[in-house]
Image (cartoon, rainbow, N blue to C red):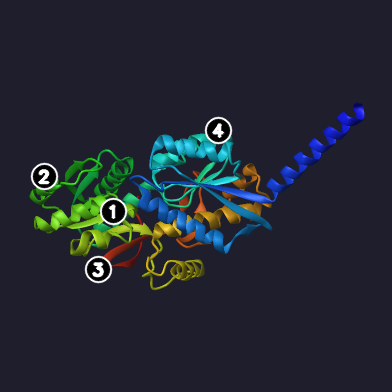
């Protein structure tokens, strides 16, 4: 009986070791992003960017990398559930995601408690990384972006009167509006009106009529691209003469399709990447070339680029750590400095946010054109 029990125990140990070794030969990277729901357009692009980076770099430290993808459905509860599943069921080493700051915050709480590092794609709200040890991001944050839009409007364009059109049901929009106002007024600009709407609205006639009465030089519109395109179309129909400037959520190839000639001359802040850039770093060149091979009928944008950059940043951290252990990955992410990425040189600061350049694009002749880099006055 003792021999039988001893043999059984030995077999269990061998089986357990074999399973651990098999798992240890694979680095599991979880992705939680909005592939359905309100934010699916951005989440899908980010996923495709990450998948491209994985295709070009399928192994790290000589180990196969497995992407495990979960849809957070553009919902806060589902975002938390998605991260829980990735950690508890799939035993991931690290996570990438997500589009939408509120979704990132919901999932971030789960990852923080479990001690699993996460790299955010385009979640720009400052609260995403606030007091977090395990959440990082490859994007800049909204105070920087709001100040960038204000700086470009006031300093570069010389426009002294501005108005705001804000989605009061969206933390992204309200936060950017606040940061734009602070910076614009600090530089000496005047905010002549602040009009509000709610996510999902399709008629902006009342707000635009009030804006026309206020007679600003420029209107800051920190909206998602679908609603933003509707606003621009209705503004043109009403004969509005002021210019519009938006933020990174307007950076989507479909905006011209939706807005038509009404989006001509529209500007927005973005990350320092666009296919129209006259000069690119080597990482951006490779990304653009490889993307065009796979998606010949769909131009890349910053969402694709940020998804790609997250994978590159994670790869760099794992290689420098010499390990896929979550705690060691976290420590390595804290020391990312001057990492070449599609969206420029990336450095992670003390609050786990990315420090990088900010770009400005304008729609000219029905196409996005990268205008250049802006230096925000925060």
Tell me which label, 1 or 4, sits earlier in the chain. Answer: 4
Residue 6 placement (x, y as % from top left): 88, 31
**In this orientation, does residue 337 appear?**
no
Residue 368 placement (x, y as % from top left): 30, 66
**In this orientation, does residue 268 appear?**
yes
Callout 3: 10 Å neighbours few (<14), some, many (20+)? Answer: some
Tell me which label, 1 or 3, sits earlier in the chain. Answer: 1
Question: How far, Cα to Cα, is label 3 from label 2?
Answer: 28 Å
* Residue 99 shown left or right of residue 324 in the figure: left
149 or 5, which lies in front? 5
- Residue at the disc numbered 2: 206
Question: How far, Cα to Cα, is label 1 from label 3?
Answer: 15 Å
Callout 2: 10 Å neighbours few (<14), some, many (20+)? Answer: few
Tell me which label, 2 or 1, sits earlier in the chain. Answer: 2
Tell me which label, 3 or 2, sits earlier in the chain. Answer: 2
**Going 25% across and 68% down the picture, which residue do you hit?**
366
**Going 11% across and 44% down the picture, which residue do you hit?**
206
Q: Quadrant of residue 106?
A: top left
- Residue at the disc numbered 1: 225
Q: Nearer the viewer, mark 1 or mark 4?
A: 1
Tell me which label, 4 or 3, sits earlier in the chain. Answer: 4
- Residue at the disc numbered 4: 113
Question: How far, Cα to Cα, is label 2 from label 4?
Answer: 46 Å
What label sits on residue 366 in the rendered view?
A: 3
**Going 59% across and 56% down the picture, which residue do you hit?**
316
Residue 254 placement (x, y as % from top left): 30, 60
């Amino acid at each position: 009986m003792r021999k039988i029990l001893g043999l059984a125990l030995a077999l269990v140990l061998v089986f357990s070791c074999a399973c651990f070794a098999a798992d240890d030969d694979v680095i599991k990277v979880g992705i939680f992003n909005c592939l359905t729901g309100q934010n699916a357009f951005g989440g899908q692009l980010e996923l495709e960017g990450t998948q491209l980076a994985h295709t070009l770099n399928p192994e790290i430290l000589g180990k196969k990398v497995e992407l495990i993808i979960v849809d957070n459905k553009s919902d806060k509860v589902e975002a938390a559930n998605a991260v829980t599943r990735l950690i508890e069921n799939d035993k991931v080493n690290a996570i990438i995601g997500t589009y939408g700051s509120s979704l990132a915050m919901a999932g971030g709480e789960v990852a923080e408690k479990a001690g699993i590092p996460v790299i955010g794609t385009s979640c720009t709200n400052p609260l995403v990384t606030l007091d977090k040890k395990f959440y990082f991001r490859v994007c800049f944050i909204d105070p920087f972006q709001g100040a960038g839009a204000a700086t470009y409007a006031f300093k570069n364009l010389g426009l002294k009167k501005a108005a705001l059109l804000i989605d009061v049901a969206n933390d992204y929009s309200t936060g950017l509006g606040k940061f734009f106002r602070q910076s614009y007024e600090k530089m000496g600009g005047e905010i002549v009106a602040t009009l509000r709407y709610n996510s999902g609205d399709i008629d902006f006639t009342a707000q635009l009529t009030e804006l026309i009465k206020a007679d600003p030089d420029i209107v800051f519109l920190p909206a998602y691209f679908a609603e933003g395109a509707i606003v621009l179309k209705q503004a043109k129909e009403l004969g509005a003469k002021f210019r519009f400037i938006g933020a990174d959520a307007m950076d989507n190839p479909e905006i011209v399709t939706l807005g038509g000639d009404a989006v001509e001359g529209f500007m927005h802040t973005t990350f320092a990447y666009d296919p129209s850039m006259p000069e690119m770093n080597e990482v951006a060149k490779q990304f653009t070339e490889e993307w065009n091979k796979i998606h010949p009928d769909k131009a890349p944008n910053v969402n694709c680029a940020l998804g790609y950059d997250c994978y590159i940043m994670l790869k760099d951290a794992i290689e420098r750590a010499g390990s896929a252990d979550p705690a060691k990955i976290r420590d390595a992410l804290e020391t990312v400095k001057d990492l070449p990425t599609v969206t420029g040189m990336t450095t992670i600061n003390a609050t786990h946010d990315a420090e990088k350049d900010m770009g400005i694009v304008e729609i000219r002749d029905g196409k996005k054109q990268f205008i250049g880099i802006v230096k925000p006055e925060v």
